[in-house]
Amino acid sequence: MTEKKLAIIATKGTLDWAYPPFILASTASALGYDTEIFFTFYGLQLLKKDLTLQVSPLGNPGMPMPMPVPVVIQALPGMQNMMTMMMKKKMKSKGVASVEELRELCVEAEVRLVACQMTVDLFEFDTKEFIDGIEYGGAATFFEFAGESDICLYI
């Protein structure tokens, strides 16, 4: 039986968008999938050693809140910090693993974490800011793996 493959493209760098690639990749790996996450553009934030991720309430009308918050209020200074604090508190109270814990789980499960070299160069990232053990590659690196994958997700 051939090993199944999962390819994920992670493009977002906010707290709420950090969870899906790491949850899906660690789960797939536990189920025996050969798994790779390709981090590009803002998704590269998820590979930084020091994660200072925030929730972005703007443009996210599906975000469950204790009470409805009009978009105009979400744009006020301090709302992003407040919503991030609320989300972190909610996750902690429900026993949800942190992004750092999920990322470490992926590393331990040998999920390949690939940083887009073009994006690293474009935004002049210092690679010392990234966690150890990641690979660097371009679109061709992603397609080499994704072209043979059973499932390909864009997150």
Image: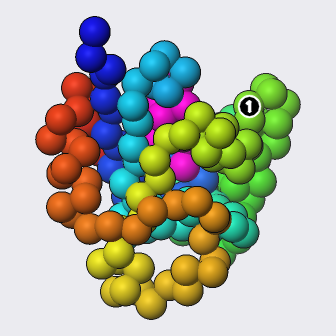
User: Which residue is the extreme one toward the top?
Assistant: 1
* Quarter of the rendering containing residue 128: bottom right
Q: Is residue 75 above or below residue 148?
A: below
Q: Residue at x 61, y 45 (%)?
A: 107
Point out the image quarter for the N terminus.
top left
65, 40: nearer the viewer: 40
- Around disc 1, counting alpha carbons within 10 Å, would you say few (fewer than 14), some (14 to 19), or many (20 or more)? few
Magenta stretch, residue numbers: 18-27
Examine the rendering and report whether any part of residue 85 can be seen.
yes
Q: Indicate left or right for 90 with 75 as reference.
A: right
Query: Residue 14: x percent and y percent?
Result: 54, 58
Query: Residue 16: x percent and y percent?
Result: 56, 47
124, 11: nearer the viewer: 124
Q: Amino acid at mark 1?
A: Val
Q: Residue at x 32, y 67 (%)?
A: 137
Q: Is residue 151 above or below residue 100?
A: above
